[in-house]
Amino acid sequence: MANAFHLDDLVANLRTAATSDAPRENVKALLEQAVADAADMQATMPEFADNDVILHEDETVSIWHCRFMPGQTVPAHDHQMLATIGVYSGAERNDFYEADLETGGIRKSSEVILSAGNVLQIGPSAIHAVGCASERPCLGIHVYLGALTQVERSLFDTEKGETLRFSDENYQRMTRR
Ligand SMILES: [Fe+2]
């Protein structure tokens, strides 16, 4: 019998993984397993109305469905907790930034393209700007080891070298479409 993907199962398994002895490894393994058969996942995933959908959040884990439309880039930001990204359709561009000691701002340090089937784990202090690197929308599951909406975090204006408080308003204003 085909081993069809079910989003509810993934969310339940990620919640269990987040409270396990090895959350980092177990969350990564679950996402790797899910996106390994990206076609199966695409076939059974619901179509969401919004680009960002919070599938679950509690003290231990936040699970988001993230869609990036072609040409869209969200501003550089941090998470203040471990983040694991799994892409199942299209491709996601991650531009990473690090502190620039000369200017006191941040500067781009590397770039990673995640295609369908790829998983990337980034540390709590990592700063990235994320966009769509494909002609079709990029679809993925982003998992954070904590309550993402409850923490103080930052947005970065990479052109002006400014750090801003993370707020929906600033995020929307700085998103390029
Ligand atoms: Fe992010």
Image: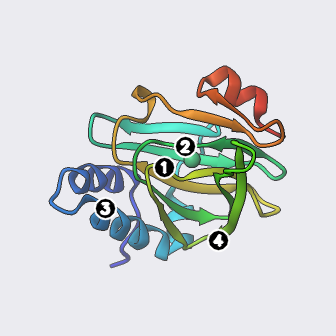
Real-space Cα distance between discs 1 and 2? 6 Å
Disc 1 element: loop
Q: Earlier in the sequence, mark 1 or mark 4?
A: 4
**Residue that extends furthest to the top in the rendered view of this protein:** 169
Quick one: label 1, few (<14), some, or many (20+) residues within 10 Å?
some
Tell whether circle 2 marks a residue whose Cβ is less than 8 angstroms from ligand 1: yes
Crowding around mark 4 (Cα neighbors within 10 Å: few <14, some 14 to 19, many 20+) is many
Disc 1/disc 3 C-alpha distance (Å): 15 Å
Asked whether disc 2 touches disc 4, contact meaning CB atoms under 8 Å apart, the reply is no
**Mark 1 in CB contact with mark 3 (< 8 angstroms):** no
Location of mark 1 (residue)? 125
Which residue corresponds to the image point at 34% horizontal and 66% vertical from the top-left? 30
Q: Which residue is mark 2?
A: 78
Residue at (28, 65) in percent of width and height: 26
Q: Position of residue 86 (x, y in %)?
A: 51, 62
Under mark 2, the amino acid is Asp
Q: Label for residue 115? A: 4
**Scheme of colours in the image:** rainbow
Instruction: Give x and y (percent) for residue 177.
Output: 84, 40
Q: Which residue is mark 3?
A: 24
133 shown above or below 147 = below
Instruction: Report, in whole angstroms, how far the alpha carbon at label 4 lies from the one at label 3.
Output: 21 Å
Does the Cβ of the disc 3 residue fall within 8 Å of ligand 1? no
Considering only order in the chain, which callout, 2 or 3, is on the residue closer to the N terminus? 3
Real-space CA distance between mark 3 and mark 2, rounded to the nearest whole angstrom = 18 Å
Q: Crowding at label 2, few (<14), some or many (≥20) Cα neighbours within 10 Å?
A: many
Query: Type of residue at label 1?
Result: Ser
Circle 2 or circle 4, nearest the eye? 2
Which of 125/137 is in front? 125
